[in-house]
Image: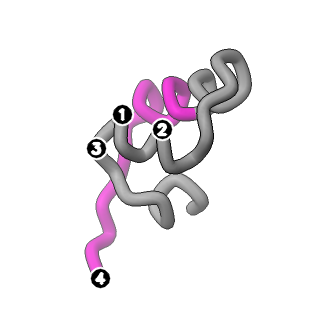
């Protein structure tokens, strides 16, 4: 399992897509090119 670190900007964008734009976690994961479990962490 990798210990990949994500930039604060990527994290902010993920939160913005869910809260402000109403995207689902699966949509955000696909948009940002990361796995769904990574977003939950």
Against 24, residue 4 (above or below) is below
Q: Nearer the viewer, residue 16 or 8?
A: 16
Q: Residue at x 72, y 26 (%)?
A: 19
Horizontal relation, residue 16 to residue 36: left or right: right
Q: Earlier in the sequence, mark 3 or mark 4?
A: 4
Quarter residue 6 falls in: top left
Q: Are marks 1 and 4 in contact (CB under 8 Å)?
A: no
- Which residue was labeled with disc 3? 33
**Separation of residues labelled 3 and 4 (CA atoms):** 17 Å
SS at badge 4: loop
Q: How is the image coloured?
A: one colour
Expressed as whole percent of the image width and height from the top left, the position of residue 3 reads 32, 69
Q: Residue at x 42, y 46 (%)?
A: 29
Q: Are marks 1 and 3 in contact (CB under 8 Å)?
A: yes
- Which residue was labeled with disc 4? 1
Quarter residue 23 falls in: top right
Q: Which residues are magenta?
A: 1-14
Horizontal relation, residue 41 to residue 5: left or right: right
Q: Residue at x 50, y 36 (%)?
A: 11
Expressed as whole percent of the image width and height from the top left, the position of residue 31 reads 36, 33
**Separation of residues labelled 1 and 3 (CA atoms):** 6 Å
For the residues carrying marks 4 and 2, which lies nearer the camera in this image?
2
Q: Which mark is residue 31?
A: 1
């Amino acid at each position: 399992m990798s210990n990949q670190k994500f930039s604060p900007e990527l994290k902010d964008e993920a939160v913005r897509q869910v809260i402000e734009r109403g995207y689902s976690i699966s949509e955000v994961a696909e948009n940002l090119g990361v796995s769904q479990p990574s977003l939950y962490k």
